[in-house]
Amino acid sequence: MKSIKYIFTLFLAIVVLGCSEETIDNVQIGTITGTVVTEGNFEPIENVRISTNPASSTVFTDENGEFELRNVPAAEYSVQARKDSLLTQFQGVEVIPDGEVNIVFEMKPETANNLAPKAPMLVSPENNSEGLSRNITFTWTSENVDDDDLNYQLEIRNDRNNNVQTYSNITDTTYTVDDLNYGYKYFWQVRVSDSVNEDVLSEVNTFSTLEFPKSRIAYVKKINGNNVIFSRDLNENEYQLTSADHNSFRPRKNHRTDKIAFLRTIGSQTHLFTMNLDGSGQKQITSNIPVNGFNLDKVDFSWANDGASLVYPNFSKLYRVNATGDGTTQIYSEPNGKFITEVDVSNDNSRMALLVNDANGYNASIYLINNEGQKTSTVVSNVDGALGGLNLSVNNNMVLYARDVSGFESEDYRQLNSQLFVYNINTQEALNISDNKPDGTNDLDPRFSPNEAEVIFVNTSNDGISQNNIYTVEINPGSVDENRTLLYENAFMPDWE
């Protein structure tokens, strides 16, 4: 009997010792293992906090994104994976006694559930609007879905070139753009960003700006030390055509091509440029052989009447260049070695008027040559003082110019009494049209009006530093006392086509 009790006691002890390897304090346990990776590319994520509910132990993933929870009492759990900047993930598991359960977490950025903003709705200008001004306020609406800070970008394209005007970091739903081009068709679109999702684009709307107003007069003003070209329309509205960042001067319009040619300083040289009437499409024409003379403020060039080419001086030589910028050719050389300061091509392209002078601007002459370079007529020859403002009439019978009748000559090329003359080639007589000029002033830079009944010109004090003003004068006035009219103040180098 004692032997039986002993055997039973020994059996019970063996059972108890065997069960103690599968329980903690008589609780059955198991293991939870797993891996944490990024959603999509399944890259392992290190240092993710792994915990359970009900609570057991807490561990962090290793460099392989793996973790292990040991001695977890058998039960059902919600396992949590948490890390800053990632969305917290939960998975349900059941731990069985002496078992191992494996799970995989695919974690997303904490912004993964953030919704993108709605596509902007374009409000104004209305789609397909026409004749709009060059200054436009763009407006649109956009719905902020997740209360994010929205940022907009406005893009504007046109139908003339590949330029894209981009305005970024706009925080409002309105934005004003100034100085769009005349007569362009524009395409505009708004892009919205919440800094979380991909940008969202609006539809593309179109509008057209008004055509450039009719303008026949161009001139120059000084802005911040640079010459800047302006024009005026028939309602006396003024338009700036060139930037104040460049020194641009001496505008000359060609009505057949609706282009304006002008001079611009590029580094140490002066070159011919052309542009559209609204100032767009500016293009350098000359390159290897620049425009040059004794004084670049006095140098002038001329269109060929068909607008296919331009004629310009370089000291004693005369060149023709195609309006496309190619085909530069020397067409004449002053035989006496004087500088060619001004040239004007006749309306029928059959002849040219030249103004030549010495290196100081004096000992000046005006004469006409044919296309073979032969002198056909002399207007003024080797006079004392300054000459300038050369212009041929449309019928080639008259030559307009300015002459300092005082005959004064100085190192700084100061003029004391410059007056305007219209020379009749047939009668060889010169008509003075500056009879009513105020004393102590100069009349300069004359050009015929389109109907040649008037002359546009500059009047300024002969001190050489005072303001320039643009006037017109009738060639054959009904009343001499009323024949001068002030057009524009503080302007010079006029052109009237």
Image: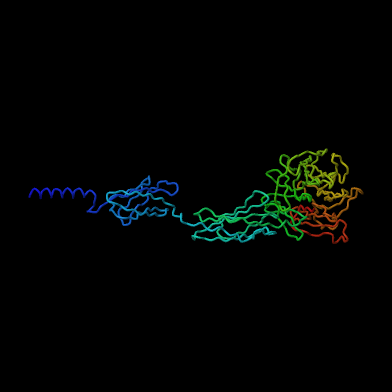
Q: Which residue occupies the extreme left position in the image?
A: 1
Q: Nearer the viewer, residue 411 or 388?
A: 388
Horizontal side of 71 relative to 8 (left or right) equals right
User: Could you say where residue 57 lies in the image, as x and y percent from the top left?
Assistant: 30, 53
Task: Give the residue at x 88% y 42%.
Answer: 376
| Of the pair 345 and 423, the residue shown nearer to us | 345
Q: Nearer the viewer, residue 398 or 410?
A: 398
Hey, which quadrant is residue 88 in on the image?
A: bottom left
> In terms of depth relative to the viewer, which is nearer, 198 or 100?
100
- Residue located farthest toward the right when viewing the structure as drawn: 427
Vertical position of residue 359 compared to residue 168: above or below: above
User: Residue 250, how many percent across, how many down?
Assistant: 75, 49
Where's residue 102, x and y in %?
Answer: 34, 48
Indicate the colouring scheme.
rainbow
Numbered marks: total = 0
Q: Position of residue 234 (x, y in %)?
A: 77, 59
